[in-house]
Image (cartoon, rainbow, N blue to C red):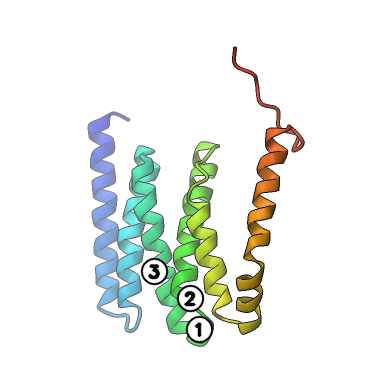
Amino acid sequence: MDDKRQSSVVTGAILILLGVGLLALQFMEGFGEAMIFFLIGGAFVVGYLFRRAYGLLIPGCILLGLGLGSVGESMFQSFGDIQGIGLGVGFVSIYVIHLIYVGKSHWWPLIPGLILIVTGLASASKDFEHLLSVGWPLILIFVGLLILAGAFGITGRKKEDHI
């Protein structure tokens, strides 16, 4: 498909998606904010899938995660920081979607994603929050050991020596 036709298809699909979503907003109560996040985030992800532009995937997944957090917050009000968990899932989904679609991915979205998920879960339980506040240096030790194991070739992944 040539670039002009692909651009028209993406633009048309985004407009249809936004129109359907905005029409649905008129009939749905309570999920209006989440629907906006889902619509705009979905449009960015559709743009990523058509263009393979990594820059579209990032705001798309973050907005979808915020929408997921909004829906979760209205459903599970007494369970910790659902917005933070949803945002963390959005960051992790950047890594997962790019890995599935391209076959490799950047590791950076895992850092804020896992931090947001863990802290969101920690706010749900005082025991988990205490364990996390006392035991977080163990996480640093574990990550350091993984890095050292990779550097010495213990993990099984061989790095080629560049001459």
Q: Which residue is tagged 1?
A: 76
Instruction: Tell whether 90 sits left or right of 53.
Output: right
Residue drawn at (50%, 59%) of the image: 113
* Cα distance in 3D space between marks 2 and 1: 8 Å
**Disc 2 residue type?**
Ile
Residue shown at 50%/65% (left/top)? 116
The answer to whether the residue labelled 2 contacts the one labelled 1, judged by CB atoms less than 8 Å apart, is yes
- Residue 82: x, y in percent? 48, 76
Using the image as rendered, state which of residue 6 and residue 64 is in the foreground. 64
Number of on-image labels: 3
Q: Secondary structure at mark 3?
A: helix
Q: Position of residue 141 (x, y in %)?
A: 68, 54
Image point 33% across, 66% down: which residue?
37
Q: Between tags 2 and 1, which lies in front?
A: 2
N-terminal of the two: label 1 or label 3? 3
- The nearer-to-camera label among 2 and 3 is 2
Q: Residues within 10 Å of mark 1 (few under 14, many from 20)?
A: few
Question: Mark 3 is on which residue type?
Answer: Gly
- Toward the viewer: 38 or 141? 141
Amino acid type at image mark 1: Phe
Q: Residue furthest top?
A: 163
Query: In screen coordinates, is 42 left or right of 90?
Result: left
Q: Quadrant of the C terminus?
A: top right
Q: Earlier in the sequence, mark 2 or mark 1?
A: 1
Q: SS of the residue at dot 1?
A: loop
Question: Which residue, given by chain and number where applicable, does mark 3 sit on?
Answer: 67
- Where does label 2 land, which residue? 82
N-terminal of the two: label 2 or label 3?
3
Figure check: 21 above or below 58: below
